Image (cartoon, coloured by chain):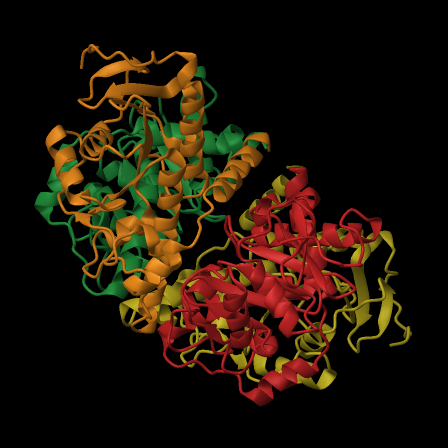
Chain colours: A yellow, B green, C orange, D red
Amino acid sequence: MAVTDFNGPDFDSWELRELKEKLVNAAHILDREGVTDGFGHVSARLPNGDAFLTLAGVSPGCATVERLVMLDLDGNYLGGEKAPPYEWPIHACIMRARSEVMSVCHTHSKWSSLFSILKGGLQPIHMYAKFLPPSGPPIYPAAGLVGTIERGAALAAALKDSAAVLLRAHGDAVVGNSIEQAILRTLQLSFLGELAHMAVAHGEPLYLSQDELATFSADQAFPARPWEYYLSRIRERRSS
Amino acid sequence: MAVTDFNGPDFDSWELRELKEKLVNAAHILDREGVTDGFGHVSARLPNGDAFLTLAGVSPGCATVERLVMLDLDGNYLGGEKAPPYEWPIHACIMRARSEVMSVCHTHSKWSSLFSILKGGLQPIHMYAKFLPPSGPPIYPAAGLVGTIERGAALAAALKDSAAVLLRAHGDAVVGNSIEQAILRTLQLSFLGELAHMAVAHGEPLYLSQDELATFSADQAFPARPWEYYLSRIRERRSS
Amino acid sequence: MAVTDFNGPDFDSWELRELKEKLVNAAHILDREGVTDGFGHVSARLPNGDAFLTLAGVSPGCATVERLVMLDLDGNYLGGEKAPPYEWPIHACIMRARSEVMSVCHTHSKWSSLFSILKGGLQPIHMYAKFLPPSGPPIYPAAGLVGTIERGAALAAALKDSAAVLLRAHGDAVVGNSIEQAILRTLQLSFLGELAHMAVAHGEPLYLSQDELATFSADQAFPARPWEYYLSRIRERRSS
Amino acid sequence: MAVTDFNGPDFDSWELRELKEKLVNAAHILDREGVTDGFGHVSARLPNGDAFLTLAGVSPGCATVERLVMLDLDGNYLGGEKAPPYEWPIHACIMRARSEVMSVCHTHSKWSSLFSILKGGLQPIHMYAKFLPPSGPPIYPAAGLVGTIERGAALAAALKDSAAVLLRAHGDAVVGNSIEQAILRTLQLSFLGELAHMAVAHGEPLYLSQDELATFSADQAFPARPWEYYLSRIRERRSS
């Protein structure tokens, strides 16, 4: 990975400061809310579009602005810590395939791991499922870490136009048009997994129809409220 | 929403101070005890009866006395932060239909969400069920957030004379003749849901009969004790 | 309840100081370890045998040495806060029936509540079950709080010579020859309930035979170690 | 147990300082991550091979460098607190049978306890299972604490060349070529147990084949990252 002819902002420039801090907060939220363990990462595409920031080989709960790395969509190093995550192609390949995606989360979430190896899929039984396809997130079936462009491209193909994809026996990848959206969706996917898991003990539940999901989707959404809330929870922790 | 000819106490008056602090504590308890996420709200009817206080577009865990709003039962703004929750009709319509109700809690409780989409209902298997109908809380079946008077009225009709109603694929609404009662019932409903969920794995449990529930109901109750306890838990958190 | 001709130590005497502090610690441990909610209590029999100390109408998590009450085995008030718990007969009647019992815990434990309404009982599937009868703890089947001598006597009869009894749709009562033993058994009963609940999903487990339980029982036990551990956890909490 | 002709480093020597601190951290991680209760222990073999350090009759969460003990592989006392854990043969016998093992963890993990009494075994349904045999960890079936050389030898025989063995109705023993590896495997075993437990409710899951596990195993591993993460979590706790 060599430095390319990238002409976006420098890794250390002031204009990236806010994005980097938000990314670190996002990583801490993943950790605080219990959807990730010592592994997993979250990324943010740069405003100019052809590069992204992510965690540099550090657990989400230990992330700092000093431990970020900047890569272009081919994985070329552009700045920051020289330890890109082994699975950087998750971020690069999805961002290349989906130009509207500004952030990608990858975790080993317990609930995503569970549904990734079940045959029935993750059916919508709560309004939070409105960001998902009616039959639930698709599954990327291959074994192995997503450490190559080939695997990353196959993952992006499995994701297709969905907001989330489950990685079989591994975890999930969730996208958003902002860091906040990718994080909130990751947390809601976890909630949906837990709920769908519990429901199975009770016989066929009353799944939401496409019309019903559409009704929920037509209502207003309030993404700023949970973001403020999750920020308050990581701040409370830092000050304790 | 325009200011009406309401002649109860002013939002900033001293006589509302205690009620506002109790409401904020109630919101923090919902959060601390894990029955809500970044969404949900709790309301308190004013002593004069025709208005209520609730959270102004803020997560229960982030509520403060400055972030409350006062509305009349038609949703007209009477004071406080100018951001009533989108689902204010949950509170207004239930209080209008049930004059004895002094407080309403609305959460996306995991357990209420679960039972809201199951066919079997939430049967009583613990003495804490004594505030519920013997066949469990009714279910409001419609999709969509309760953001209009029409939906609020339909919700109040589904609630009827019960202490709680489940909102399908969404959560619950629980009422009380005081803030303390609405909160304690919300927590007990969560406990009852968890218990009923676990019991289903073991074959038909020994449900409580109406007579048995009546025996438990005839015994004394001690609502001050858990309220003191839950307050101690939010205070411990604040001081840590 | 009038003061009787009791001639044991005075409630405020120095010789009870250590016992009272241990009792408060025990209540805090019940709370810290999550086996109780705002209700429940724990008692300690006095060395002279015919009286006991317990919580005076306060949640276990809020207990202090000032909020204890001393009663004789008929429930007569002997000192401390004048608010004995409504269910004092749980303690008095069991201590009267079982002279070796020095401490009784009563909680609304989730796991005890669950098994109290199941038909199959709580079978031994872990070595911690060595303090229980091979078919699990007996069940007290009656509805209603144990607020009278009659109900307390029926509970003691259901307990018989077991170390624990489940109160149907209510919780449990667990006894020990010391406060430490009653607490540790309560925590282990909770662990056993969780384990037995999970096992049921997997088909018939390999239950421990009486011989196998006897083998575990024949081995040494180390009750001081978990007591030190649980104390460290409540101290950590107090200092945070 | 008498002092032998051991000629490795003295218990109080500086060269053991780092190993002892790492061992205490390991014990605290076991506690912090919830895989152990007041019981359980972890050991570290000395560089010279024929002795080990472990907890001296203290709960993992209460371990300190002063409360360690040094024993040779026959259980002879070599230094430190004179209270070796009753089950020291778990460590001594496994280290004797497996010369590459540098650390052994023993816990009463809820998930290991569960699968130890199930007939189906713990099948691999997540990439974290790559350190386990394809049919899951073997089970040591005998009742009783592992307090004698005979029982320890039987346990080592059940473990054979696996990385973990389940102790029926008791817990687990997990080995590693470093303290870090033994701890990470213990945590992953717990995660795998939870996942396999949940999966059983959904019909036959898509187990990983040996080829698929081999694909995951062929990928790089990053053990330093979770170790840093788990250390950060015990430090956060100490400073709170």
Front residue of B51 and C238: C238
Horizontal relation, residue A183 to residue C17: left or right = right
Quarter of the image where the N terminus of chain B is located: top left
* Res. A35 in view: no
Front residue of C204 and C124: C124
* Res. A94 in view: yes
The residue positioned 79% from the left and 78% from the top of the image is A74
Quarter of the image where the C terminus of chain B is located: top right
The residue positioned 19% from the left and 47% from the top of the image is C168
Residue extending farthest bottom = D211
Horizontal relation, residue B171 to residue D60: left or right = left
The residue positioned 74% from the left and 63% from the top of the image is D224
Front residue of C184 and B70: C184
Front residue of A112 and C72: C72
Q: Is residue A206 above or below residue C237?
A: below
The residue positioned 76% from the left and 59% from the top of the image is D6
Estimate the x, y position of residue D84 in percent, counting from the top left.
60, 51
